Image (tube, rainbow, N blue to C red):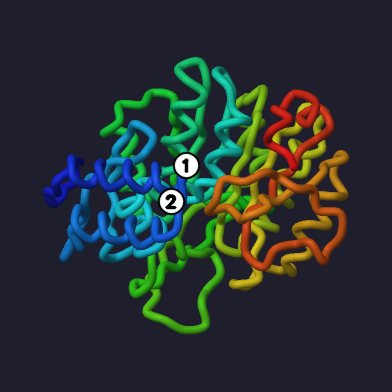
Amino acid sequence: MEQKVFPVNRWQIRSAHKIRRFLTQHPFKGSARLIALFNKLLIPVPQEGPILAPTNYGFDIIVDPVKDKVLEGAIYYYGTYEAGTLEVLQKSLQAGHVFFDVGSNIGFMSLFASRLIGKSGSVYSFEPEPETFAILKENVRLNKLNNIYLFDMALGSEKKEVFIYRDLKTDRGKASLIRPEQGDVRPSRVPLRTLDDFIAQNRISRIDMIKIDVEGWEMEVLRGAKKILGHPQAPMVCIEYSHRHPVYSAEPLDIYRYILSLNGYRIYKLQEGKERISRLEEIHEVTQLPVHDNLFCFLPKHLGILPKDLFA
């Protein structure tokens, strides 16, 4: 079903995005104030959504910056989100690659990856929250992409049914399989499968990269992916590491230690964090771990073929 979107001046929004990109790449004293001024002049503050917003990457996406001021607000006002993470994907994914997006939300990363891997590649997008999945599905339809496969299920360490909880007063990206202690939550029953079982049942012969962002459920996804992550052809991994929300049946540090125990992975983070384009630096000890950021995990075979300018 097509979703009604509220009209905006797309030329003005694109112009503001272009000005911001230029001034960000060529900063000078006062450039931040100039960016804010052009944004204020060219991008209206929406009173309601959803809105079909242009991005910096050649595709449009349905967002609601009124309800979601984090991911969807950033896309609306800036045309991007997690620019540092996108740069790593840009330099890691190639035509024909297979990308798994675990916790796809409305599909921004999936749409971006789809353009990198082309018609010969595949994106597998997993989003269990029903309302968010409907928007993801519509975003794929609007962009006429045939290389993205959508699954309204959660991934974890076993096969069963679980509840996903969405706090109606926070952004939709905060939906979690962990029940919050407070808030106006709306639970939805969803199927849970392991990544290893999904790969076997669908006869998937290769995965080049997995992105995992599941609001505290990361350790469960890893436990259900032990076989693929221990395989000689194991994929690159981008995973959220955070002390800002609880981690189910684990501590954040367990994520780091678990990945290190598998297959000789080496773990990196962006020098300036996921929101800014910067180089990757290796994490050698726990004191280097971030409070809230993405970890990028590579095998020696990946490091041998990735561009050298990706790393510090």
Which percent across, then down, holds residue 29? 44, 59
Residue 209 or 278: which is nearer the viewer?
278
Q: Is residue 311 above or below residue 189?
A: above
Q: Is residue 158 visible?
A: no
Amino acid type of the residue tagged 2 in the rendering: Asn
Q: Secondary structure at mark 1?
A: helix
Q: Contact (CB < 8 A) between labels 1 and 2?
A: yes
Residue 104 or 271: which is nearer the viewer?
271
Mark 1 neighbour density, 10 Å: few (under 14) some (14–19) many (20 or more):
many
Residue mark closest to the camera, 1 vs 2: 1
Q: Quadrant of residue 237?
A: top right
Q: Which mark is residue 105?
A: 2
Q: Quadrant of the C terminus?
A: top right
State the separation of the CA atoms marked 1 and 2.
9 Å
Q: Is residue 229 visible?
A: yes
Mark 2 neighbour density, 10 Å: few (under 14) some (14–19) many (20 or more):
many
Q: Residue furthest bottom?
A: 182
Which percent across, then down, holds residue 98? 58, 27
Amino acid type of the residue tagged 1 in the rendering: Met
Q: Which mark is residue 109?
A: 1
Q: Which residue is depicted at the point 69% across and 45% down? A: 296
Q: Is residue 272 above or below residue 118?
A: below
Residue 192 or 234: which is nearer the viewer?
234
Which percent across, then down, holds residue 119? 45, 17
Q: In the shown orientation, is residue 266 left or right of residue 81?
A: right
Q: Which residue is depicted at the point 74% across and 69% down? A: 251
Q: Quadrant of residue 1?
A: top left
Q: Which residue is depicted at the point 14% across and 49% down? A: 8
